[in-house]
Amino acid sequence: VVHCHSWFTVAVPLYLRASFAEDPLFAGSKIVFTIYDDSFNGEWDKAFIDTMKGEGVPAEILDKIGELSYENIIKLVIDNVDGIVIEAESVPSAIEEYIAASGKKVLRGRADKSDGEWLNDYKEFYDSIL
């Protein structure tokens, strides 16, 4: 399981699914993405798409982004992972709806992690993906 945390790791699932899909080290890997309360509110660099294409991510995958925004990039990541963990108190409704429609496995994190039970939640979640 490759577990990517937050918006700044959005390139990893795309690389693993496209550029490294045939690499024996990553072939068959399961990918999990965690959403936190740290959405990117700045402007995405337009070079992001060209850089990803230059690294072997096919245009047909990247063209799904449309307008380069946090919401659209997260949706693209959701398309390219096996499971989603939500550790945010609130997620934009459009992303919540997209996750629900995706049929992907979802783990909602516990606000209180003091008892250690959250570790069992993660273990069960990973087991369900594997």
Image (cartoon, rainbow, N blue to C red):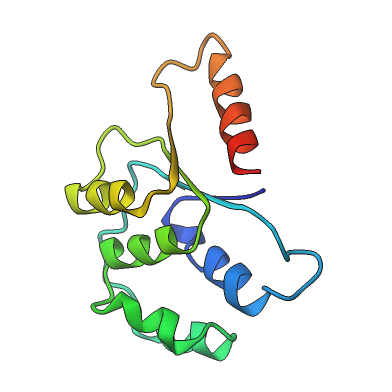
Position above or below: 75 against 66: above
Q: Residue at x 42, y 22 (%)?
A: 110
Classify residue 89 by image quadrant: top left
Q: Quadrant of residue 86?
A: top left
Q: Is residue 92 above or below residue 73?
A: above
Q: Would you place residue 113 above or below residue 68 in this image?
A: above
Relative to residue 67, is residue 123 drawn left or right?
A: right
Q: Residue furthest top?
A: 115
Point out the residue furthest to the left here: 93
Residue 6 visible in the picture: yes
* Residue drawn at (35%, 84%) of the image: 63
Count of all numbered marks drawn on residues in the image:
0
Q: Nearer the viewer, residue 63 or 73?
A: 63
Q: Nearer the viewer, residue 101 or 107?
A: 101
Does 92 sit left or right of 126 as displayed? Answer: left
Q: What quarter of the picture does the C terminus occupy?
A: top right
Residue 70 percent coordinates (x, y): 29, 63
Report the residue at 43% width, 15% height from top. Answer: 112
Name the spot of residue 103 as percent of width and height, x first. Answer: 38, 49
Whether residue 48 is visible, yes or no, is no
Snapshot quadrant of residue 48: bottom left
The location of residue 71, given as percent across then percent down, is 27, 61
Query: Going 43% across and 28% down the picture, which residue do you hit?
Result: 109
Task: Determine whether, in the image, residue 116 is placed left or right of residue 96.
Answer: right
Going by the image, does 46 lie left or right of 93? right
Placement of 121 over or under 79, stated as above or below: above
* Residue 13 in picture, x, y percent from top left: 55, 64
